[in-house]
Amino acid sequence: MEESSDLYNVYETNTPPPWTDHQDQCLEDLECLRRKIKYYFMNPCEKYHARGRKPWKLLLQIIKIAIITIQLVSFGLSNQMVVTFKEENLMTFKHLFLKNYVDGGMDTYAVYTQEDVYDHIDYIIEQYGHLHNITVGNHEYDKNGAVYTPLSLCQDFYRNGTIYPGDETFEIDAQVQTECLKVYPMYHPSLSEALPHFQLHFKRMLSIKITFVLKAINLQTVRHRELPDCYDFTVIITFNNQAHSGRIKIDLENDVDINECRDWKVTGASARNEHLPMLLDCLIIITCITSFTLCTRSVINGIQLQFEYTLYCSNHCDKKVPLSDKLEFVNGWYILIIFSDTLTIIGSILKIEIQSKVLTSYDVCSIFLGTGTMFVWIGVIRYMGYFAKYNILILTLRAAFPNVIRFICCAGIIYLSYCFCGWIVLGPYHEKFRTLNTVSECLFSLINGDDMFPTFKNMKQKNSLVWIFSRVYLYTFVSLFIYMILSLFITIITDTYDTIKQQQQCGTPTSELQKFLSVCQDLPESGVYKLDKNKSCFLNCCINRFKKHQERLTSEA
């Protein structure tokens, strides 16, 4: 009777039962979870109105874009002078050491007689010996102490062999033998004078390589208030006879080594202040580290919210969260910024090493700085996506990406099949199909409508069957890829765009996460978001439920 009267008193006095407080607390914590997730997906302006938090990441990204762009332009101008100096020196060496060389004639530059081979070798030796009298640059010989390094001439040939084309017989030893000689052009201006008994084994010869080292200083950087660098050019002239077709192709290339000049003095102009570029690089490294830290923290917060939301759906709704909803918590823009910050930090460190002459890896540094800057500028699209008219483009690209990847995989298989077929069948009769690389470039150009008529026209008509096959091959490829595959690709993007646009016009939630957040109608200016940002709402609800359950068991005991 006492228990029933107590229960009666509870209802008569309108006193809420003990479990009502527990339900209210869970509902309150659930709303808190909704607000936390909704706050996480707000843009910087909304977060400022919700909690008064300054958009530090946005300001940091704007500053980072400005200083990284300045760094890239500065490095690009400096690198451009290096590239120009190397390319112009390569062209100079071709005119100095290749007899009767004409610009752009490297593909057809060759010799066809034994006399021409000896004549060209003697010309190289003579020009090298008279370098001081003929060059208009500041080129100098390499020295080993007080002695000039000689010119190296190496001949690769089969060790032994007898060849009789008239009798259609031959005997060859495939072992390649190398014979190298040192020539001092200052004392012997020709090969016959340096080595009277030296001869070339033309029938067994594979190649002849003439190697020498020249030094130069890039003085054009003085006008840009930069200290000049000293260059070592290793010039390699190759006589290629591997085909044994009677035509020996000649090629000239150079390997460049950039070093810090040992002693320098600049007068009449202010020298470069090396500390300013390094200070800018250090500022960029600090900025990128800060950006990396803030974005990493945001990614961790998103993962924590994902865990809380997953725990709620598992305990209260008894269902699993789809992968698409889980990925919503992992902000891809933060991942992109983290990746770009990493590349920029590495590139800035390499740039400092280059400026201090510890390294000369201009190409590697350019890849890191260029790729990092590209991703930084692409990251600007994230902030443009906060506007509805720009956001539809981002949503379309993100929604269409899986379908586009699947489509490209299928189309790529067909594309590769045409590449292999064109290479093996049309390669002997068309220059654009000689290698797999050129075949792929040619077919990709055809897809975009470029260079279509010359591709048809330049097909050799020596074999009628192959000529007919080439027409069928090219017509089917153009028809399939331009009129069908390319049209289907555009259709995928268009359909996705229409779907996203319709969803935005209707304004209905399209995922379980959006339905979950649509219940929360609190505006950023309402003030309800000003909570402890370290508070884990749903986890607190679970902890409170566990504590009350323990208290109930204790009281019953």
Image (spheres, helix red, strand yellow):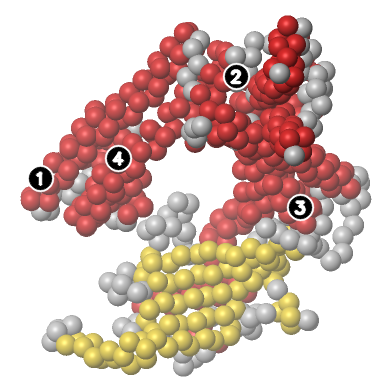
Q: How far apart in space, not on screen, are marks 1 and 3 (Cα)?
A: 58 Å
Is residue 547 at least partly visible in the picture?
A: no
**Pointer 4 residue:** 411
Q: How far apart in space, not on screen, are marks 4 and 3 (Cα)?
A: 41 Å
**Pointer 3 residue:** 349
Which percent across, then down, holds residue 441? 36, 45
Q: In the displayed structure, would residue 314 be above or below residue 36? A: below
Is residue 527 at least partly visible in the picture?
A: yes
Q: Secondary structure at mark 3?
A: helix
Which amino acid is tagged 2?
Leu
The quadrant of the picture occupied by the C terminus is top right
Q: How far apart in space, not on screen, are marks 1 and 2 (Cα)?
A: 64 Å
The quadrant holding residue 339 is top right
Sequence-earlier tag: 2 or 4: 4
The quadrant holding residue 63 is top right
Which amino acid is tagged 3?
Ile
For residue 517, which numbered disc appears in the image?
A: 2
Q: How far apart in space, not on screen, are marks 1 and 4 (Cα)?
A: 25 Å
Q: Nearer the viewer, residue 315 or 479?
A: 315
Q: Secondary structure at mark 4?
A: helix
Which percent across, then down, holds residue 486? 30, 30
Judge left or right: residue 180 versus residue 113.
right
Closest to the camera, between mark 1 and mark 2, is 2
Farthest residue, direction front: 1
**Pointer 1 residue:** 468
Sequence-earlier tag: 3 or 2: 3
